Amino acid sequence: MNVLNETAVIWSAECRRTVSSARAVVLLGLYSLISLAVLLVGALLRAWIQQMAEQAGGVLAPSEQMPTLVVVVFYLSILFLPLYVALMGFDQLSGEVGPRSIRYLTVRARRSSVLLGKFLAQTTILLGLVLALDLILCVYAWLSTPGFGFGTFFLNLLRFWAGTMVFSLAFLALTTLCSSFTSTPAVSLVFNFIFILLSFCIWLAGLWFGREEGHPLESIRYLSPMNYCTKLLDPEPLQFGGSALAYVVFALLFLGGAYTALRTRDL
């Protein structure tokens, strides 16, 4: 079999295994509860602000394109998304490297096919889970916003889904990298969390130094994938395209590191 056929077989098998496990359902429920909690808290705050505005003689009208609350929930929810991705795929390779069961795959398929097949399987599951959450946000916007028509609904659903996916792929590739150079799932998960927290710290440090114009350490924020998330819903195609390109570059770098680690280690 060539590389594409090997990758397709592994991708199909991994998709069936992941869907049949309870982890995907549990994590979807967890992520949904987090998003719902943020949405409810935001709704309560908006209702309180609306009441105060009416008492003052003014009315806060929602946007006809997308409620501010939904945009806030979107950005707050993607802050939890790297942790969700790590919990979903931390053992995709290390879970088989430890007990040596990966040897049964590597004698029948190339290591690159094993890596890509498992990564694509996780990507496929993530596509469905993220679409379900983005659909809920857009349904809420449709029900709560006057003038939120059919065309606007699908346009914003596409924007939310595209933005969430390019963001997720970089962290999914990071999870693959952490799982490729460790031998136990627990260690892989710890390393994954460390790199995620490090990414947050680098981003926040760059923003902190950026308070002073021309500070030489301001540029360190560009080394963090988190730095590019603020443009994911930008209506300007070039702004979104720049962020999407940055996440593709991060994903390719992480996958390249994962392939190098898997190719050189003794399985």
Image (cartoon, rainbow, N blue to C red):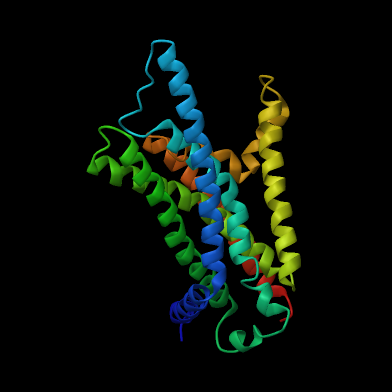
Q: Which residue appears at 70% of the width and 28% of the height?
A: 208
Residue 165 point in image, percent of width and height: 46, 53
> In this rendering, is residue 228 above or below 131?
above
Report the quarter where the C terminus lies: bottom right
The residue sitting at 60% across, 42% down in the picture is 226
Q: In the rendered view, does 126 fall on the left or right side of 141?
A: right
Q: Is residue 87 visible?
A: yes
**Measured along the vertical axis of the image, is residue 181 above or below residue 154?**
below
Residue 103, image x, y percentages: 65, 86
Evaluate whether residue 252 shows in this view: no
Q: Residue at x 49, y 80 (%)?
A: 13
In screen coordinates, is 92 left or right of 198? left
Residue 184, image quadrant: bottom right
Q: Nearer the viewer, residue 225 or 96?
A: 96
Query: In the rendering, at what x and y percent does residue 112 appear?
Result: 56, 74
Q: Residue at x 67, y 67 (%)?
A: 179
On the image, the x and y values in percent for residue 57 come to: 39, 10
Vertical position of residue 49 compared to residue 58: above or below:
below
- On the picture, is 259 further left or further right than 9? right
Q: Could you tell me how many numbered marks the image carries? A: 0
Residue 99: image quadrant is bottom right
Question: In the visual, does 102 lie left or right of 38?
Answer: right
Work out whether 267 lies above or below 38: below
Which quarter of the figure has residue 31?
bottom right
